[in-house]
Image (cartoon, grey):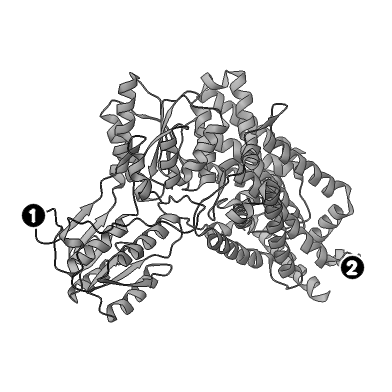
Amino acid sequence: MLGGAFIGAVAGLSAACTSNETPNTAQTKGADGNNPNSQPGKKVTIGFSAPAADHGWIAAITNNAKAQANAYSDVTLKTVEAGKDAAAQRAALETLIAEKPDVIVLLPHDGKELNAFGLKAMEAGIPVINLDRAFPDPLAYRTQIKGDNYGMGVAAGHYIGKAMKAKGVSAPIIGEIAGMDELELTQERSAGFKAALATYGFSVANRRAARFTADTGQKEAQNLLQALPRMDALWNHDDDQGIGVLAAITGANRSEFLMVGGAGSRKAIEDIAGDKTVLKATVTYSPSMASSAISLARLIGQNKGMADLVELQVPKEIILSSETITKDNAANYLKLGF
Amino acid sequence: MKRNAALIAVLIVLFGIGAAIRPDLYGDPAWVVNNTWVILQQAAAIGVVTIGMTFVIIGGGIDLSVGALIALAGVWSTTVATQQFGAAGMIFCALAVGLGAGLVNGVLIAYGRLVPFIATLAMLVAARGLAAQISGKQTQISGDRFINSIATTRLLGIPVLVLILAAVAGAAWVLLNRTTFGRRTVAIGGNAEAARLAGINVRRHTMLLYALSGICCGIAAIMLTSLATSSQAAAAELYELDAIAAAIIGGTLLTGGRGTIVGSLIGVVVFSTITNLFAIANLATEVQNMVKGGIIVLAVLVQHGGFHESSLSAWRRLYRRGSRLERSLHQQ
């Protein structure tokens, strides 16, 4: 009977998406008067593929890509449904290649499994922009743009470290609520957090792993609060599960510590700006990278470089810096919340 | 009784382990009382689901769709449209969705002659899909103060969620032990063919059992929405397995015909206590899952009085009973 265990659906990956308003405001970059690249240029056809949305972050990726492409009069976007797994995505990509797009933007189901496709497209003369989940082989992409999970942890660790030093807390009690523990990205986030805290001589007192959902966030937080009757700081990896974490904190009437979130959902940014909860900051892992990937694809298709850089071509790799959103800069980030 | 005593012994041992690891916390009576409420509160939603599951299993079936139904009921009751109708509208919606989906399960199994495992597995997949569709894969925040306050309110010092669980459990105990409905459930699970010959409408009763499980999912959906102040398609992940496991270690026979509400409740509390204890001891989730697995095996071994009734023969009986149930349904 417990064979049913195998049915255990693997839920979302990195997830953070909080909205009741269904139409997502996309994260796009509009025309910028001083940027020569914003002038319409050669027509570019961009092929785009990302896994079917199973959670808000991926949904935001696809929405952003479409919205950014719409913002350019010289870009035609051809999206193909990537289906459920790497095999389905590979099949979909074959049809995309046949349509001969100028550039392909690809968020693979799995970087390793679709590496061969990247190679094939590159050999066929179609530059590939590899989005977020990295191809191991540098020959398989023209440009790679991805988020920085380790950096997220580092940013959270530094924020907490500095805040504790500023408060004069010499041996803070720090809690951590991670996301799905079996994912590499969760391990990277925790490793970055640990390393950054260590530079202040701090360490994590208790670490719980939730499942990127609000109900598991609530459960783990409620137990964590029991384990640590007094706490100085808490890092929660994901703003989506953070809704549940905050509910648990409210339910327990606790407010003696500060909390840092992760990902940068609109709800979290609003909470930080409002400054009425323990949530004082969040570290980003933004799906805005999809918009940027479309912009990079356009530049590559038009054989242009990034206007502010000296180089005439788009760089090979871009790793987004994980940014720390606090009350002071929340207003700037609100449009990037998802 | 012996079974429940064994589980209570497990709870005492768990408490002892906690006290040994964190004497600072367990030495504080106020903390211990509060922690007990936390454990019971965390057992509340899954407890209600387990009660519904206990009825289904006693009646010779299985319901794999409970987690998905909680997610569907939760998501449906927290859409912007539903929230306009206030707390009463949200509660009605969750219960109606749970009941409706439970009835679909019941009709498919009792009248469509689908094996419960297959019918509810199909419902699991479909309900998660529908929930994702309705929510647009977004986390839907509950803006209703009343709903959100359910989980944070205490009456006479007792968390409201625990009171809801107690009320559901009390009603379920009466239903199972003091009514014809309960006796019929046991009779059908024990021997569907004999029950049919005795004049019980096996099909209608089977359908009602799944509807009951569905309503329990609706109640649990409101509880979970209140706890997390939100709902999403991925909520209540693997609740079906937790509920089945809790019912089993509580002494419910997977092959049907036997089980108790009290046993199932203690089963839920054992798992909830383990989760709590592991957090307090700062141990990783994977270790916790291994211990949970071990406890399931041990509990069933104790109940069977050792290896006399091997799992193999239990499977064989399960299979035979399944085909008997199928035959009796065909003959109706």
Find the distance from the CA under tag 1 to the CA under tag 2. Answer: 88 Å
**Foreground pick, B73 / B58:** B73
Disc 1 designates what residue? A310
Residue A65 location (% of width, % of height): 33, 63
**Foreground pick, B324 / A207:** A207
- Is A312 on the left-hand or right-hand side of A176? left
- Is A333 on the left-hand or right-hand side of A42? right
Q: Residue at x 28, y 34 (%)?
A: A196
Residue A8 location (% of width, % of height): 52, 57
Q: How many labels, in total?
A: 2
**On what subunit does the disc labeled 2 rest?**
B
Quarter of the image where the C terminus of chain B is located: bottom right
> Which is in the foreground here, disc 1 or disc 2?
1
Q: Tags 1 and 2 in contact by the CB under 8 Å rule?
A: no
Q: Residues within 10 Å of mark 1 (few under 14, many from 20)?
A: few
Residue B77 visible to an observer of this rendering: no
Residue A238 visible to an observer of this rendering: yes
**On what subunit does the disc labeled 1 rest?**
A
Disc 2 designates what residue? B197
Dot 1: what SS?
loop
Amino acid at pointer 2: Leu
Dot 2: what SS?
helix
Query: In the image, which disc is placed on residue A163?
Result: none
Q: Using the image, determine if residue B59 lies above or below residue B293.
A: below
Q: Residue at x 60, y 46 (%)?
A: B225
Residue A272 location (% of width, % of height): 41, 37
Amino acid at pointer 1: Val
